[in-house]
Amino acid sequence: MAPRPTHTKFIFVTGGVVSSIGKGITAASTAAILEARGLRVTLLKMDPYLNVDPGTMSPFQHGEVFVTDDGAETDLDLGHYERFTTATMARLNSVSSGQIYETVINRERHGEYLGATVQVIPHITDEVKARILKAAEGFDICLVEVGGTVGDIEGLPFLEAIRQMRLEYGAENTAYIHVTYVPFIKTADELKTKPTQHSVNAMREIGIQPDIIVCRSEKPMPPEVKRKISLFCSIPPENVIAAVDAQSVYELPLAFKDEGLDQRLCDQLGIWAREARLADWKRIVEGVKIVDPEVTINVVGKYVDLKESYKSLCEALLHGGIANRVRVRLHFIEAEDLEGDADCDAILYGASGILVPGGFGSRGTEGKIRAIEYARTHNVPFLGICLGLQLATVEFARNVCGMTDANSTEFNPESRHAVVDLLPEQRGVTDKGATMRLGAFQCVLTPDSLAASLYSSAEISERHRHRYEVNNEFIGPLIEKGLIVSGLYTGERAKQAAALPDGRKGLIEIIELPGHPFFIACQFHPEYKSRPRAPHPVFRGFIQAAAAFRQSRKV
Ligand code: GLN
């Protein structure tokens, strides 16, 4: 039996019955209450798909791609992990089958298995365990969420690896939480436990007896339902934890505490820790429940019917609302609906802020440019993110500086005013994934700018995910007409960029318009770093400006 190389205790979170039942939120909320007990907690997501990372997956398929400081493109659950805890996620906190197989096959090609037959057990499972141990180093608790649903063929190697870890480290160092769905059947007026029983049976078939079952349900769970699940699934009734649908996901840490989840885990794992201190979560939940005043933000994007692809963005806006004690209502507008002979005024009027988020591909860009023009000319608070900054630059170049064909070369490679372009060294790169600017980059703020006042700081670090940059060659006339460059990346990559008219050398990270109540756009994604307990300054400021706009206009 392998010795336990760290003092860490492991909590494994699996899911059954159906997908999308909130395993990620369950793992994150469990981490939150354990952290509230003073424990050092980290999390790890294991995804069974064969993609090496979700970077190249369509947002329709996968939802948002979350980006870490060290530039990993990961599953959106890592966003939940960061928002619910104080942990900072990195590349090692997200593992896919693709990565595991890639590592093992590369090792095999290098002859490192010394002629052995390379197999799922032990080679793949050993690599899975090695990744878990690596991520766990230095923490009291490592929560490991296994993606997918029990019964999926793809997830088996991961489940086998976590099964072995119980054998190796014992029940006092490992706990299995199984998240299931307990449907309410209207005609019977009853919550049904059968799917949970089947799902737990499927776990047992592969050798894992869950210690705790978290039951998602629409209705409160009566004691007899818990007793039934306890009996059929062989766990004490107090280990059946109800997770009833709530208005906000941020209620879950409180609900779990009420259900005794943290205590059950601490009992099993022999952890002595103080009571969970959840005062800040209570404040967040109060903040989420504020209904008045309500501030409406027009979010002009693509994929608007799939809000999962803007997960962190929606959360960051919500955090901005909590910080300002207002309710934020998001009005999603399909950018293409603003194109052609659309009546933009009619569509955009009524909201107190306009946001153009990140995006790829040309569909809808002209509509987004119209939304930006509307925000600029009607003094509506505006926040542009990534593509939103690029298009704000295009809009200003076209409509204020007379560069009528201004564009990003992503959308018009022939434009004579390529105000957004690839950096010279990227132009020849054909392997798409390799050319992205990914992860955290430092950014120097211009004194006395809106950006500097929002951040109250001279230098910041934010996360990126894009290929194109504002082209400094064309920025002169825009600055002359009043555009302010208020954030600049001056590191290694910036050496390829031309100097700004004032002699500063760097890549443009933030632009803003003085004289406008709030018009700011950033090349990075501030939403990745917003947490309910630490709302991001840009979103706090944006919602504050929107609330003031609403007050002045009564909209
Ligand atoms: N498509 C743009 C680029 O690649 C913007 C990307 C984004 O908004 N994340 O630079």
Image (tube, rainbow, N blue to C red):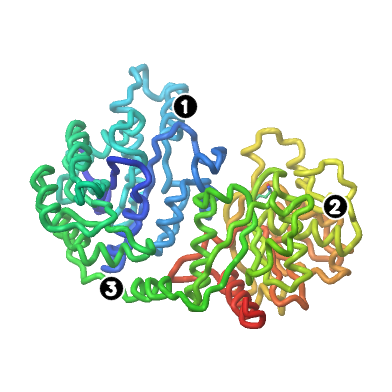
Of circles 2 and 1, the one toward us is: 2
Of circles 1 and 3, the one toward us is: 3
Identify whether 26 is placed above or below 63: below
Write down the quadrant of residue 170 in the picture: top left
Label 3 secondary element: loop
The residue tagged 1 is 106
Identified by mark 1, the residue type is: Asn
The residue tagged 2 is 406
Q: Residue at 17% of width from left, 65% of height from top?
A: 272
Q: Earlier in the sequence, mark 2 or mark 1?
A: 1
The residue tagged 3 is 277
Q: Earlier in the sequence, mark 3 or mark 2?
A: 3
Query: How far is the residue under mark 1 from the one under mark 3?
Result: 46 Å
Query: How far is the residue under mark 3 from the one under mark 2?
Result: 54 Å
Image quarter hosting the N terminus: top left
Write down the quadrant of residue 34 in the picture: bottom left
Label pair 2/1, CB-CB below 8 angstroms: no
Identify whether 278 is placed above or below 22: below
Query: How many neighbours does mark 2 have within 10 angstroms: few (below 14), some (14-19), or many (20 or more)?
Result: many
Query: How many neighbours does mark 1 have within 10 angstroms: few (below 14), some (14-19), or many (20 or more)?
Result: few
